[in-house]
Image: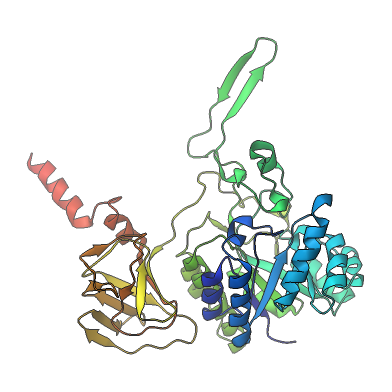
Amino acid sequence: MDKIELLSPAGNLEKLKIAINYGADAVYGGTSTFSLRIRSGKEFDMESFAEGIEYAHERGKKVYVTINGFPFNSQLKLYEKHIAKMAELNPDALIISSPGVVKMAHKIAPDIPIHLSTQANVMNAMDAAVYYDMGVKRIIAAREISLKDCEAIKKELPDLELEIFIHGSMCFAYSGRCLISALQTGRVPNRGSCANDCRFPYEIYAHNPESGTTFRLEEESEIGTYIMNAKDMNMADHIAEIIGSGVIDSLKIEGRTKSPYYVGIVTRAYRNAIDDYYAGVFDKERYQKELHTTQNRGFTDAYLISRPFERSDTQSKGFTIQEGTHQVAALVSEEGITWKCKDKTCVGDILEIVLPIGAVLEEVDNEYGTIWMGEDGKWWMKIKKIESIKGKKFECIHSGDLNDIITPAKLPPYTILRRGIKEARIKKGLDEAPHAYQRREEKKDKN
């Protein structure tokens, strides 16, 4: 069996490039037309998506196009035109949900493989066989599937590729089959415009129709009211088990609407996990430490290993999302000679350098800053001078400032600069620095 594929989200051209530089074998994305991620799809037009496919192919990587919405009758001709346009870009596969669109794609683009979207909810060998007979090359299994069921499908259909989710948002409903958003806001999840209503806090009331009296039910303290908020999937602990099963062809990371930092860090963590498994040096604590640097809703290993009825810890009822252990401060450009601010950064700041897969650095000390490897084996940068490529100078620069700031040395494309979340919160004024707190307490004692 070939080495398992790592598949990462490409919400726009920059994220596509970051995913590839941080270790993805393939990426998935598309324009907003008929994709289940309209918000991210709007960041791609046909020209930029074509550029992304060319970028990936030049580096021996693949691009899978999302055409996984469910069409209205009035949209069928539009689907035909869109598939034809996408076929001209020479993608490596089309991701489709609807059986009718599968048939349509075979007719319009017979040479492009078809991957069946998770929205089709394939959970068994019988349903998998139906799509396989229709010419589907790969099935993206529902998030609710078990590894045992994957093994059963592969036993019946050994030539059918299986792709599973290993990280990212989980849906309150069954693999996206939800109508809450459509009911409350008119935004239809299965046509790409989910409003994430399950992530909101809710209040519960009891109403007596005879008296017309309504009572608000009080929630137990610290239990929370995010009653439909699913934790995020995190399967890093089980990568060895998944690969060792021999039945999975591709490991998929969710997140086309997530940040560039998320795409880079999560892709790199699973790249390392996969490579370490094959090298016989698997270390799950190493990967988890990195994954926990990202924002999350709490983590769960979901249902691949354990059945749903065996689980009681898959919901985050007390909060919608929490900060990770780190905050991205800056992202280095593709050229490697400038960085853009993502979080308040000042002269004198020391930032951790997170490198793309395979990148190397040399120590540097000049007027713009110092780069060195610490005793912890990590690379660090101290900022001595914040100057834009146009000559504008800053003592501090804030998130949203679009000036390109000169790096102390040429860095690998899309290098990430980050700091711990506690330091980030202090810089934003959300928390007090330890010494400031101590001075305030000492002043109170004197008074």
Which residue extends farthest left? 446
The quarter of the picture where residue 68 lies is bottom right
Residue 58, position in %: x, y? 60, 87
Q: Is residue 19 above or below residue 373?
A: above
Q: Quadrant of the C terminus?
A: top left
Q: How many marks?
A: 0
- Left or right, 24 with respect to 114, comes to left
> Residue, x 15% and y 47% (percent of image)?
440
Q: Is residue 250 left or right of residue 330?
A: right
User: Residue 35 location, x and y as percent?
Assistant: 69, 60
Residue 105 falls in which quadrant of the image? bottom right
Percent position (x, y) of residue 89?
69, 76
Name the residue nearer the viewer: 309 or 136. Answer: 136
Figure quadrant of residue 280? bottom right
Q: Nearer the viewer, residue 350 or 41?
A: 41
Q: Where is residue 444? Give x, y as percent.
A: 13, 42
Residue in the image at 57% along x and 35% along y: 202
Q: Is any part of residue 125 visible from this angle?
A: no
Quarter holding the N terminus?
bottom right
178 versus 257 height, above or below: above
- Looking at the image, which residue is at 50% across and 63% down? 259
Specify how the rendered protein is coloured.
Answer: rainbow
